[in-house]
Image (cartoon, coloured by chain):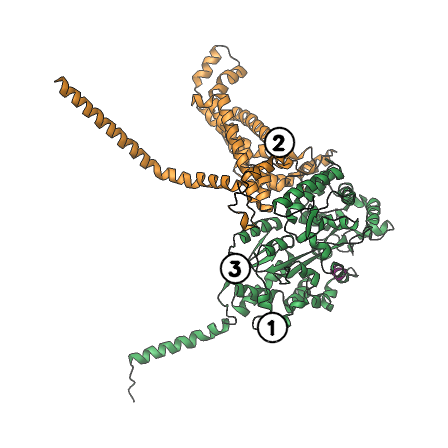
Amino acid sequence: MSISLGTTGRVTQVRRIGLERQRRWFLVWCLAPALAVLVAVTLAPTIYLVVTSLTPLNLTNPMTAWNFHQPLLNYRLLLSDTRFQNSLWVQAKLSFWTVTLQMLIGIGFALLLNTRSGMMQALRTVFLIPMVLPPIVVAIIWKVLYTPDISPMYWMAKALGWNLPTFITDPQWALPAIIAADTWEWFPLTMLMVLAALQTLPEELLDAASIDGARSWQATLYVILPFIRGTLMVAALFRLIDSIKAFPLIYLLTDGGPGSVTEVTNYYAFEQAFNFSYLGFSSAITVVLVLVALLLSWVVVRMTGWSAEA
Amino acid sequence: MKAVTVSRRGILQATAGATVALYAPAVLGKAKSKYAGTTIHGGAFSLPFHQYLKNYFPEFEEQTGIKVNFDIQAFPVYNQRMDLELSTGGSSYDVIIVTFIYQNRWIGAGWVSNLDEFTTDPNVTPADWDAGDFVPGVEASMRDAKGHTYAYGVEAGAMILAAGRGDLIEKAGLSLPTTMDDLIKVCEAVNGKDGVAAWTADKLHHWNWPPYLQAMGGHIFKNPPYNLTPTLDTPEAAKSAAWYANLLTKYGPPGVLSFTDDQAMQSQLSGRANMRTNAITWGLPLAKDPNSRVSKTVRYGMVPRGPAGDFPGVACHGFGIPAGSRKKGAAWEFIKWALSKQMLSRLVKEHGYPSVCRRSVIHSEPFKEALTLNGQDVAALYAKVLDQLGDGSYMRYRTVPVFPQVGDKINRAIEAIATKQMSAEAALKQAQAQAIEAIRMGGYKVDL
């Protein structure tokens, strides 16, 4: 009896393993089309980028394609390229200031607009306008604002007797000018995300804090912000990654100048590829940029413990 | 009455006959070229030439049966896109502008077609089209080492001095400057008068500065196109760059360092800035544009010379056919028509087009008439600049394959000097080092 029971148990176990395997294969086959698309769309170009970065590919010289005689040459050149190093520093400054300002302003506006009044809801829509404008239009708006001859800002300053510098050609002001424009364009995104998170905040938490005698700033600091920490992390990461892709504003407003004051790494890679045809070198710059972005994202996630929470 | 017999064969014959009778005239009317029914695609950056020429496209289409589609883009966008398009051997375009600074690169890489195949065939190009009529200095950069021609000049952007407010200069008891020293004296005397800045320029410093570099005895390369060692770190270059940066910052309107071509021209048209040296195409609207506020006060002259002589820039853009085009015959029909003596003469007579590259048109009476502005013979100035160009040797720096890379370093160096981020010596030393690296990366040797 016990023998037959044991056999039945084994049979059941074998059947369960078989079912489990079938289930796993079923899942694999279900995922296969999506994975195939992912490989084709994301992984293959990335691999091609890395492979290209190991060649001196120059569009004017077909012999340079698939030439792997000195695979690390581009990376060696980067080590001694002061303009590349400067572009990394400019990128760091741009990313730090744009992400910080967009987060602070976004949180501030979200807290202000987190009411159910009709006027505030209308205001929310108005604040979203910069974000939904095409980036080129945003760049043109700021180009007009920063051009002394045609800018209402300069006209007003002149009427008040102020002498404003030409922001986009002044080395002290060119980067802040880009930061201001970028912040204007993208703080609505953080505002929107934070506002959505605030709408899910249970009233009971705030009531409890209020009963415990917490003032409004204490409730914000100890109840609201911890509650929306996950959203803040996502918003900061989105903005950080996006700041590394900054392009239209720089292209239209400063062209990376004056000198190289606003030349970020992304823009430097664009110039090498599309103005000079040095695709191999540009790929190496882009690979470094991708690695930096991945590293930064990882550090941010680890530092905040967001992944553990998730 | 005789009965009429209608047979099946009779009906078919009558139908075929009627079809031929009805359609033949239309077909024959259109079949004026063996390429009738073909559509060619053209690519160009924004030039007044295209604005004028496109008015006559219907005539070309009527004459040949070839349809023409042109993509017009901004200068930097066009160059980037066309560089990429040509590098892939693509067949999207059949006629393109072979941009001056890309000529050596595109021709050297075999990306554009040898046009001698068309011009030497009398069945394709009649002798009176006269390929030898194009200004030799203009054509020099559009030929390869063997003398084959790859493009024909559409625009010779000959640099002249245009002073929108010549009256202010005269009021100050001065005349248009002819030397670099005079230029500073004039700027000093008229800057800020009537709220007008004395000088203006666009931000393409690698085009605007070299005439003053060469006038002070400096050069961009040692001996282009044979020796591409950059020579940006010389004392002459530093002196000239400092002089030019000072011209921009001390006498230019606010924001001059960010000006595009259009902005610089607008600053003159609106009377906010006075003098500028640039291609004649950008100077003539001051007299001819209906919106110009300076049409009565504009004066023209030669680019001021320096101790080493005068070297007015001349940028010659031409029409060419991409190597990958599948409609080369039809494309040549278009080029032949657009750059014929007759068409260029019409552009001069009907639109006052100034940058013609054919000698017979430049020396014609209608050209002189069209370019007599405020009583000044601007046609003679134009002809003088083209004479000065000679065989084009002093402009060779601009057509070497690595010029876009080196030009970028020059732009950034001038900006750094003008904004006082660096001294002229330091900025050009840095530009020299970066240029050497870029030239080596392009596979060229330098003497170091």
Q: Residue at the far left: name it.
A: A1
Q: Residue at x 60, y 55 (%)?
A: B108
* Cα separation between marks 3 and 2: 44 Å
Residue A117 seen in this snapshot: no
Which residue does the numbered mark 3 point to in the structure image?
Answer: B325
Quarter of the image that includes the N terminus of chain A: top left
Residue A68 versus residue B26 in the image, above or below: above
Give the chain ID for the green colour.
B
Which residue does the numbered mark 1 point to in the structure image?
Answer: B126
Q: Are marks 2 and 1 on the same chain?
A: no
Residue B145 seen in this snapshot: yes
Percent of width and height locating residue B251: 78, 43
Q: Residue at x 44, y 38 (%)?
A: A43
> Picture quarter containing residue A203?
top left
Percent of width and height locating residue A150: 68, 42
Task: Tell me whether circle 3 and circle 1 mark residues in contact (CB < 8 Å).
Answer: no
Give the chain ID for the orange colour.
A
Badge 1 amino acid: Pro
Q: Secondary structure at mark 2?
A: helix
Q: Secondary structure at mark 3?
A: loop
B2 in magenta: no
Q: Are marks 3 and 2 on the same chain?
A: no
Percent of width and height locating residue B241: 76, 43
Task: Tell me whether circle 3 and circle 2 mark residues in contact (CB < 8 Å).
Answer: no
Q: Magenta part of the protein: which range?
A: B381-386
